[in-house]
Amino acid sequence: MATIFTRIVNGEIPSYKVAESDKFYAFLDINPLAQGHTLVIPKQETDYIFDIEDKEYQELFLFAKRVAAAIKKAIPCKRVGVAVLGMEVPHAHIHLVPLQSEGDMDFRKAKLSLTPDTFKEIAEKISLSFE
Ligand code: AMP
């Protein structure tokens, strides 16, 4: 059965899209640690990120680098943090989180609750900065 992220890529489930290429897709995490928390995924479904073959793995991280640059431009932050967990969704994904301090990357903390309008506004801002 397709993962929830494949269903997002296929447009069966809505997402707040930030960037897309033929192979990769970036969208806002629905339970964000900070405004602008983004997930970057390969469209090709692989559960564990370190099972992705080398070329696609490199391209995924290069795509994530471009998304991180767009986040940095669009969202006031000191750094964009990077994490890979994969404890919940079995479809490889990279978390990009705008950081003001180390604590912003604590995945145990309470997530933000944002309105659809705010999600849309953030996604649009980041996507406009994506090059
Ligand atoms: P993990 O697999 O542990 O890296 O966590 C999966 C992440 O995906 C969590 O931060 C969820 O909030 C996020 N997530 C799950 N479903 C969706 C969805 N439909 N849209 C956006 N983010 C999601």
Image (cartoon, rainbow, N blue to C red):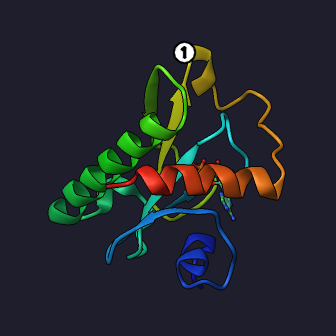
The answer to whether 125 is drawn above or below residue 10 in the figure is above
Q: Judging from the image, what secondary structure is the residue with disc 1 in? A: helix
Residue type indicated by callout 1: Glu
Residue displayed at 24% across by 51% down: 62
Q: Position of residue 43 (x, y in %)?
A: 41, 74
Q: Nearer the viewer, residue 84 or 17?
A: 17
| Location of the N terminus (image quadrant) | bottom right
Task: Please state which of residues 75 and 96 is positioned toward the viewer in this rendering.
Answer: 75
Q: Residue furthest left?
A: 55
The residue lying toward the viewer, choosing from 129 and 85, is 129
Residue 66 to residue 13: above or below: above
Which image quarter holds the C terminus?
Answer: bottom left
**In this rendering, does residue 112 appear at all?**
yes
Q: Residue at x 23, y 65 (%)?
A: 56
The x, y position of residue 61, in whole percent, is 28, 50
Q: Which residue shows up at 37% across the image and 55% down it?
A: 49
23 sits left or right of 7 in the view:
left
10 Å crowding of disc 1: few (<14), some (14-19), many (20+): few
Can the viewer see residue 25 in this picture? no
Number of numbered tags placed on the structure image? 1
Between 106 and 62, the one nearer to me in the picture: 62
The answer to whether residue 39 is left or right of residue 56 is right
Q: Can you identify the residue that label 1 sits on?
A: 102
Q: Ligand 1: does it lie within 8 Å of the C-beta at label 1?
A: no
* Location of ligand 1 given as a quarter of the image: bottom right
Relative to residue 33, is residue 19 depicted above or below?
below
Going by the image, does 15 lie left or right of 39?
right
The image quarter containing residue 3 is bottom right
- Measured as percent of width and height from the top left, residue 24 is found at 37, 68
Tell me what residue is drawn at x 83 percent, y 43 percent: 113
